[in-house]
Image: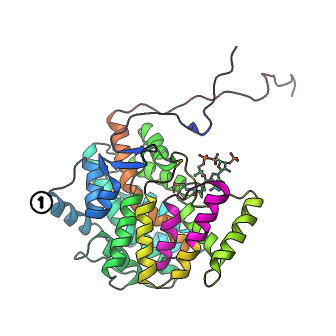
């Protein structure tokens, strides 16, 4: 009997259709509902992109106004969630805090068991609106700072920065942050989205699917890479001479067969379609915060990685230092990814439910042959 073929890591295996986004590694393009992500980053807000992912079309003026009003009205955190976050030790990773908070929101939402599209949209918008409060609250409590109430007169990204830092951000910072949110929003059947779809396929609830997706995103081979990139930069050390130190660091790391975080991709082999747009935002932030040394280090590591391994950066590579410059704690970078990707996850959960089939692949047993418990044992 011929051994069945194993598709380790499901690499190269299409498992379903999706109309949410299209990744084309050949043309190096990424389309959200048909629109190139670069065009969206240049001319839409993150709120418009979230609407697009959920409803399939960009909103007209009235639809956007209604959507924004709803999102802004849901931003607050009730006492119970803050109390539970406060119970978590400061040693907890911020991803564990976000995962717990989403689970708590699910446990207290009366809509949780209702899996109609209408109810799931309401839950998705609720999470989308509350995640900035959760992420900023957690970063602030680590610095012994009070919660900053959301402001309904600010757009999503301006408010996120306001709640995190307690001051009104300037426009270039808001734009760079908004671009990062748009670029992180959706990327077809990546590990966390697939996790969300697996959970949804059992007819579990949307909050459970998002909680599971957060767990999948935490790993450094996936979303945790944006945090890990900054640890690399910290290991190399900022300031003068960074370029030489970066090359030395890389050679030593490769000699130890370490994976270099923020490089490589399962699907893109000629470079990540989102990197040029994010790098552009990084360069703006480098200029805004006057940190040319960081860009020098960034370029040196990228160039050396290209020369040594011919492996290109992924989105996490420019996103990590951008968030660092804005003032986010390094451990908070992946929760920022959660705040964005919740839009893509929930669009996929709803798509999965619209034509559901339980996701249950096969495995090939390679353990010991059948045996029997000795008599009299
Ligand atoms: N550093 C060093 N070597 C690498 C890297 C890297 N970052 N990426 C791939 N390689 C090498 C790998 O060692 C292997 O070499 P060999 O064939 O000699 O053993 C070859 O390239 C193929 O790598 P792979 O790990 O088998 O390929 P994959 O498709 O399973 O990996 C990946 C994709 C993203 C897990 C991997 O590139 C990686 O670990 N990158 C670092 C973590 C990272 O940046 N993750 C973010 C991914 S994209 C955005 C996101 O999801 O957040």
| Residue 31: image location, x then y, percent | 34, 48
Q: Nearer the viewer, residue 233 or 4?
A: 233
Q: Is residue 98 above or below residue 7?
A: below
- Decide if residue 55 is on the left or right side of residue 277: left
Report which quarter residue 63 is drawn in.
Answer: bottom left
Above or below, 141 against 313 in this view is: below
Q: Is residue 362 magenta?
A: no
The majority secondary structure of the magenta stretch comes to helix
Residue at 49 percent of width and 47 percent of height: 190
Res 254 → quadrant: bottom right
Q: Quadrant of the C terminus?
A: top right
Q: Is mark 1 within 8 Å of ligand 1?
A: no
Looking at the image, residue 218 sits to the left or right of residue 135; the answer is right
Classify mark 1: residues with Cα within 10 Å, few (<14), some (14-19) or many (20+). few
Q: Name the residue rendered at 26%, 63% in the picture.
A: 43
Residues drawn in magenta = 298-327
Residue beneath label 1, please? Answer: 62
Q: Find numbered disc 1 in the image and state the secondary structure of the residue it sits on.
A: helix
**Residue 25: percent from left, percent from top:** 46, 45
């Amino acid at each position: 009997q011929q051994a069945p073929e194993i598709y380790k890591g499901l690499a190269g295996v299409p498992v379903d259709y999706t109309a949410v986004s299209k990744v084309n590694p050949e043309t190096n393009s990424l389309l959200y509902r048909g629109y190139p992500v670069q065009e969206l980053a240049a001319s839409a807000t993150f709120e418009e992109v979230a609407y697009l992912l959920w409803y399939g079309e960009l909103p007209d003026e009235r639809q956007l106004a209604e959507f924004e009003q709803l999102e802004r009205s849901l931003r607050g955190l009730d006492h119970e969630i803050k109390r539970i976050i406060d119970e978590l030790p400061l040693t907890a990773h911020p991803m564990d805090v976000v995962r717990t908070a989403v689970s708590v929101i699910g446990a207290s939402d009366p809509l949780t068991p209702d899996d109609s599209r209408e109810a799931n949209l309401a839950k998705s918008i609720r999470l989308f609106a509350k995640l900035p409060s959760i992420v900023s609250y957690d970063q602030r409590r680590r610095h012994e700072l009070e919660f900053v109430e959301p402001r309904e007169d600010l757009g999503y990204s301006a408010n996120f920065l306001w709640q995190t830092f307690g001051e009104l951000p300037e426009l270039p910072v808001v734009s760079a942050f908004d671009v990062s949110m748009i670029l992180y929003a959706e990327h077809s059947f990546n590990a966390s989205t697939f996790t969300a779809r697996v959970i949804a396929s059992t007819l579990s609830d949307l909050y459970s699917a998002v909680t599971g997706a957060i767990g999948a995103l935490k790993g450094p081979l996936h979303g945790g890479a944006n945090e890990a990139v900054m640890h690399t930069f910290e290991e190399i050390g900022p300031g003068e001479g960074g370029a030489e130190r970066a090359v030395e660091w890389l050679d030593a790391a490769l000699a130890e067969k370490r994976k270099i975080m923020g490089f490589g991709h399962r699907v893109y082999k000629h470079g990540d379609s989102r990197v040029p747009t994010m790098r552009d935002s990084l360069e703006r932030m480098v200029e805004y915060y006057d940190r040319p040394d960081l860009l020098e280090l960034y370029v040196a590591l990228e160039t050396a990685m290209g020369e040594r391994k011919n492996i290109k950066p992924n989105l996490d590579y420019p996103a990590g230092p951008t968030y660092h410059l804005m003032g986010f704690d390094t451990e908070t970078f992946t929760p920022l990814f959660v705040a964005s990707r919740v839009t893509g996850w929930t669009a996929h959960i709803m798509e999965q439910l619209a034509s559901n089939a339980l996701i249950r692949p096969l495995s090939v047993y390679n353990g010991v042959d059948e045996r029997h418990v000795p008599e009299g044992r």
